[in-house]
């Protein structure tokens, strides 16, 4: 475990609060603990028992459900290299200043995220992080259909709707439709624009934003970072049920 920094803004993060209220799982404390478990690149071994022993030793919570809940909202991403699973915190480098004396990471980089199982967040009355595909009620289920809608108005697919935000952005980056566009940089620009204009940065709005983006796009921001992307990894910035039209995005 390492010493990490926590910003005051963390305690105001609505997305993490909503996730904790919905699942009745201690996701906020667990997320902080994962920062300490992660190396300087934000990577950690996906070992539920060991992570729980280090982060929440006195709790009886099933830590695998906590990890799954965080992954479904894009706060962490699970990936596999060989026969071993790892995790990475996408927002780690944007919010942590690592001591230069900390040793280099000895964990492999993520090349492809591990697909999440076919499940969605269970109703908060059940207190579970997930359940079988096809369940879910009301507005949440409707929101999942909306976020899966593809560019060009095609019918949404269940596979797309089940992707976490981190996986969805990676999928867009690999889509030939957006060749020459730095998807993560555009995401950061869109989030900032929404903050300034009090709009909801939904997936539908972001697809419309990408369709209007200039191409080709020259390179990444310095050091490969995307400083405008100030989200903590997903959460409230990707609320699928939030109102978000397609007509108010600037050209």
Image: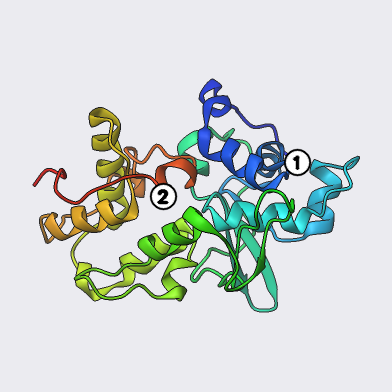
Who is closer to the viewer here, 158 or 213? 158
Residues at circles 2 and 1 in contact by the CB criterion of under 8 Å: no
Q: Which mark is residue 154?
A: none
Indicate the quadrant where residue 67 lies. bottom right
Q: Residues within 10 Å of mark 2 (few under 14, many from 20)?
A: some
SS of the residue at dot 2? loop
Q: CA distance from mark 2 to mark 1?
A: 37 Å
Question: From the viewer's perspective, is residue 16 above or below residue 65?
Answer: above
Q: Is residue 204 left or right of residue 139?
A: left
Indicate the quadrant where residue 28 lies. top right
Image location of residue 87, percent across then percent down: 62, 58
- Colouring rule applied to residues: rainbow
Image location of residue 25, percent across then percent down: 73, 45
Mark 2 or 1 closer to N-term?
A: 1
Question: From the viewer's perspective, is residue 231 above or below residue 83?
Answer: above
Image location of residue 212, percent across then percent down: 12, 56
Residue in view at x 62 percent, y 36 percent: 101
Which residue is denoted by mark 2 in the rendering?
241
Residue in view at x 44 percent, y 67 percent: 161
Residue in view at x 53 percent, y 26 percent: 12
Image location of residue 200, percent across then percent down: 32, 40
SS of the residue at dot 1? loop
Q: Is residue 165 left or right of residue 129?
A: left
Residue lying at the far bottom in this picture: please name it.
Answer: 82
Which residue is denoted by mark 1 in the rendering?
1
Residue in view at x 20 percent, y 72 percent: 177
């Amino acid at each position: 475990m390492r010493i990490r920094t926590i910003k005051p803004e963390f305690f105001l993060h609505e997305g993490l609060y909503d996730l904790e209220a919905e699942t009745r799982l201690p996701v906020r404390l667990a997320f902080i603990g994962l920062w300490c478990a992660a190396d300087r690149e934000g990577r950690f071994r996906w070992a539920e028992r060991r992570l729980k022993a280090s982060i929440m030793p006195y709790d009886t919570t099933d830590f695998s459900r906590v990890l799954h809940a965080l992954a479904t909202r894009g706060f962490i991403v699970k990936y596999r290299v060989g026969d071993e699973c790892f995790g990475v915190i996408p927002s780690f480098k944007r919010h942590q200043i690592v001591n230069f004396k900390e040793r280099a990471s000895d964990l492999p980089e993520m090349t492809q995220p591990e697909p999440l199982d076919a499940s969605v967040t269970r109703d908060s009355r059940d207190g579970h992080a997930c359940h079988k595909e096809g369940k879910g009620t009301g507005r949440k289920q409707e929101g999942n259909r909306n976020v899966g809608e593809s560019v060009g108005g095609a019918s949404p697919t269940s596979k797309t709707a089940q992707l976490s935000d981190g996986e969805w952005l990676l999928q867009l980056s690999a889509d030939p439709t957006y060749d020459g566009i730095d998807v993560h940089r555009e995401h950061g620009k869109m989030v900032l624009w929404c903050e300034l204009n009090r709009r909801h940065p939904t997936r539908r709005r972001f697809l419309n934003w990408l369709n209007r983006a200039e191409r080709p796009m020259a390179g990444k921001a310095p050091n490969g970072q995307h400083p405008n992307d100030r989200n903590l990894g997903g959460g409230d910035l990707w609320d699928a049920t939030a109102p978000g039209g397609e007509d108010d995005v600037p050209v």
